[in-house]
Image (tube, helix red, strand yellow):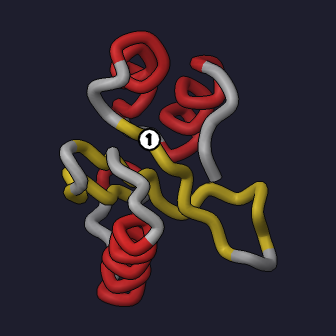
């Protein structure tokens, strides 16, 4: 999921107890980072991870309290980035 406004990024940071809330301006105002909310298909409202993309690369993928992503989440993030590349979507 992509955040709709700055408040959603702040809420994501509060829910996962990490600092993504401070990235809201990077995403919406400056466009220097792209923030993506990672969810389970069956539970789209429950935050799992927060993904930061920049220069067509994964900068970070963090879970609750900055927990490192598991291998499955890392693979899915790489697939997402590759799919964006095939569609010529650049971050």
Q: In the rendered image of this protein, does residue 10 appear above or below residue 61? A: above
**Mark 1 = which residue?**
35
Please state if 28 lies on the left or on the right of 41 as rendered. Answer: left
Q: Quadrant of residue 86?
A: bottom left
Q: Residues within 10 Å of mark 1 (few under 14, many from 20)?
A: many
Residue 28 in the image, given as x and y percentages of width and height: 48, 19
- Badge 1 marks a residue whose secondary structure is strand
Tell me which residue sits at (64%, 53%) in the image. Answer: 1
Residue 80 in the image, given as x and y percentages of width and height: 44, 72
Tell me which residue sits at (54%, 32%) in the image. Answer: 14
Residue 88 in the image, given as x and y percentages of width and height: 39, 60
Q: In the rendered image of this protein, does residue 79 appear above or below residue 34? A: below
Please state if 90 lies on the left or on the right of 57 as rendered. Answer: right
Q: Quadrant of residue 24?
A: top left
Quarter of the image with the C terminus is top left
Report how many numbered discs are placed on residues in the image.
Answer: 1
Tell me which residue sits at (34%, 56%) in the image. Answer: 62
Q: In the rendered image of this protein, does residue 41 appear above or below residue 34? A: below
Query: In this orientation, which residue lies closer to the viewer: 22 or 36?
Result: 36
Tell me which residue sits at (50%, 46%) in the image. Answer: 16
Please state if 7 lies on the left or on the right of 72 as rendered. Answer: right
Q: Quadrant of residue 73?
A: bottom left
């Amino acid at each position: 999921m992509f955040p709709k406004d700055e408040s959603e990024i702040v809420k994501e940071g509060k829910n996962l107890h990490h600092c993504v809330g401070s990235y809201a301006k990077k995403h919406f105002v400056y466009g220097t980072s792209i923030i993506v909310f990672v969810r389970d298909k069956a539970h789209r409202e429950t935050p799992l991870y927060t993904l930061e993309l920049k220069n067509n690369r994964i900068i970070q993928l963090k879970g609750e309290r900055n927990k490192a992503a598991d291998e499955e989440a890392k693979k899915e993030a790489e697939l997402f980035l590759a799919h964006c590349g095939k569609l010529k979507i650049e971050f």
